Amino acid sequence: MAATVIVALPSPAFADDGTFALEAPAGASSAWIEFEQAGLAPESLVVRARIDDSPWRALTLTQTTFGLHAALPIEEGRLQVTVVSAPGGSASSPDAAITVLDAADNVLASSSVRLRVPAASPAGGSSPQPAEVVPPAARAAGDVPGSSRSGWLAATGGPQAWGALLATAGMVVAGIIVLVSRARRSTIGA
């Protein structure tokens, strides 16, 4: 049933002001907000969230193995998350994910986008810059700041998979050659 709910929900909307949203269904109890990018520091982003028209709440980001995490209690409604660069923060391009859970920690809805967060001026400079969503076509072409990846293989991890496949095939061929060679020696010696 949870899979049906996830598929039925639309993708998050993303506005020009760095805000993206997801409809939290009935039974929603908490939401996890994740920003996945190696080396992303909690102080590099300013993240706020709200349900429907309630006041904005600043989220505390914690470091994880894959990036940053925030959790907040929520209820049914439109969950909005806004992301801006923190003063002095460097440019980043994390994958942002929202996961809505019920009281038993069952996933009710989830969605993700790739963000482009511009570098911010030092404290006291201009106002923070809102994040932008990276269109799927640009992700496939490797159009992500600071990324040398390109093409569909980079997006899927393909080069590593092909390398492993070729190495495995080479070992299988070498093993067959050794077995055939030993079999020939044993029939010649007999």
Image (cartoon, rainbow, N blue to C red):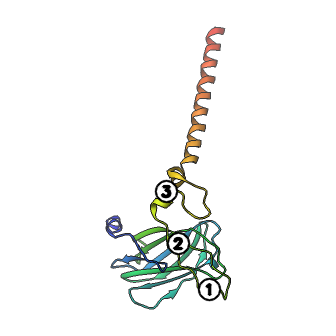
> Looking at the image, is mark 2 or mark 3 nearer the viewer?
3
SS for tag 2? strand
Q: Residue 121's quadrant in the figure?
A: bottom right
Which residue has dot 2 on it? 34
- The vertical placement of 28 against 66, above or below, is below
- What type is the residue that disc 2 sits on? Glu
Which residue has dot 1 on it? 126
Q: Position of residue 115 (x, y in %)?
A: 52, 70
Q: Nearer the viewer, residue 155 or 133?
A: 133
Q: Nearer the viewer, residue 109 or 45?
A: 45
Are the residues flagged by discs 1 and 3 in contact, CB closer than 8 Å? Answer: no
Q: Position of residue 15 (x, y in %)?
A: 43, 77
* Residue at 36% in and 77% down: 23
Q: Nearer the viewer, residue 63 or 140?
A: 140
Q: Of the residues under marks 2 and 3, which one precedes in the sequence? A: 2
- What type is the residue that disc 1 sits on? Ser
SS for tag 3? helix
Q: Of the residues under marks 1 and 3, which one precedes in the sequence? A: 1
Which residue has dot 3 on it? 140
Number of marks drawn: 3
Q: Disc number at residue 54?
A: none
Give the alpha-carbon distance from disc 1 to disc 2, as whole Å.
27 Å
Q: Position of residue 169 (x, y in %)?
A: 57, 34
